[in-house]
Image: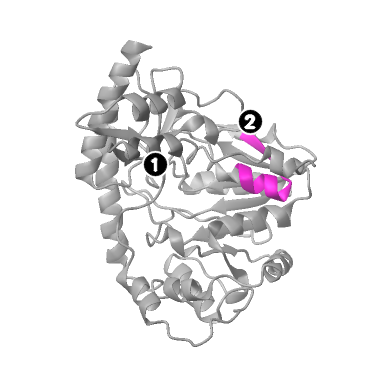
Amino acid sequence: MELSKRAREIQASPIRKLMPYAVAAEAKGIKVYHLNIGQPDIPTPQEMIDVYHSFSDKVLAYGPSQGLEVYRKGLVEYYRHQGIELQTKDIIVTTAGSEAIIFAMMVVGEVGDEIIVPEPFYTNYNGFATMAGIHLKPLTTYAETGFALPEDSVIEALIGNKTKAIMLCNPGNPTGTVYSKDEIFRIAALAKKHNLYLISDEVYREFVYDGTVHTSVLEVPDFADNAIMVDSVSKRYSACGARIGCIVSRNVTLMDAVLKFAQARLCPPTVDQLAANACVHLKDEFFTTLTDRYKARRDLVMEELKKIPGIVCKKPEGAFYIVAKLPIENAEDFIIWMLNDFQINNETVMAAPAEGFYATPGLGRNELRLAYILCKEDLKKAMHIFRTGLAEYQKRT
């Protein structure tokens, strides 16, 4: 018997691809600093933890397919605080941001249709697109320009009969790039001109630095029919295991269709919604403290990267990732070598090879994504090991 085409073609996660090497290293007693995955080390808000501890319903029943009304009302207030006016009917709660993205892809396109995505992009978009039968058409951006979007003519050259949407991640994973208000409005104008949807992944909306301001696709005027926003609590509240997200649009017809997908999977997790709802009114000071800590970590990593001759890396303005182009040919081989053969004081480093974040074959082979999700003390050790190991690897290759 043969497996389905989607089963044969779905991509293994490059973020987790090298985990067997890390597991083998740790089994030998080697400490591995994990800079490969966006799992924050900052504690989940106590308000969220308290909900789990206090939940006392005798029956954990099905909830509404669109999400609990109390949580959707909470989200309306949360987004209002962000300057975005919504109604509960504009929001469907999902099982993490992942399901929100899958729903968005399935609702905008037929099997074989295309969505334009700037590359490098969050690698799991590949898997989601395979599930939805969608083809991702890469819009290549470059480390030398800080992964900035190209001019309109380059984007329009990719638009064809099968193009149904443009998808952005803002702030970006894996690049940390933040698109300005002008850029969001420019891409929205292109989408409207060509009758396309604009899907905006805004999971990292709070993580912006240096006075940068995040602009949501939902802020674009006269764009309700085209705009789709997807979101998640995973990074915002350091709650990756809660698996609560949402899909948001003021397009009534589109949201009616999304609800049918939501009904097919019954409902999102009840207790996790209640836990997430406990955080929707967290004070601004919570996020100010959070972003200050990540900014300090970013600055530490950038200072260390600047010491590497031949590296290409512009300081990102958001999220908690850096993509660096290294003065070597194969970043994956380098990381495998680090995990197998290189330690300082019985410690080594793992990062995510960036090739898997590209759709264009051959791109990103000499690039890495570093997630600065460790405390500054651990980051400093990790970056020292990283720089020393890279210099030794260059001598050997």
Instruction: Report the front residue among 397 and 155.
Output: 397
Q: Could you tell me which secondary element the residue under label 2 belongs to?
A: helix
- Residue bearing the label numbered 2: 154
Q: Residues within 10 Å of mark 1 (few under 14, many from 20)?
A: many
Instruction: Report the front residue among 230 and 144.
Output: 230
- Name the side, left or right, on which 71 lies relative to 266: left
Q: Is residue 198 above or below residue 350?
A: below
The residue depicted at 44 percent of the width and 61 percent of the height is 241
Q: Is residue 118 above or below residue 325?
A: below
The residue depicted at 69 percent of the width and 38 percent of the height is 9
Amino acid of disc 1: Tyr
- Magenta stretch containing residue 266, yes or no? no
Quarter of the view holding residue 1: top right
Q: Quadrant of the C terminus?
A: top left
Q: Could you tell me which secondary element the residue under label 1 belongs to?
A: strand
How far from the left and from the top, in percent, is residue 272? 47, 71
For discs 1 and 2, the disc positioned in front in the rendered view: 1
Q: Is residue 157 above or below residue 4?
A: above
For the residues labelled 1 and 2, the Cα–Cα distance comes to: 26 Å
Q: Is residue 83 visible?
A: yes
Quarter of the view holding residue 396: top left
How far from the left and from the top, in percent, is residue 102? 64, 54
- Residue bearing the label numbered 1: 321
Per the rendered image, the range of residues in magenta is 126-138
- Magenta stretch containing residue 136, yes or no? yes
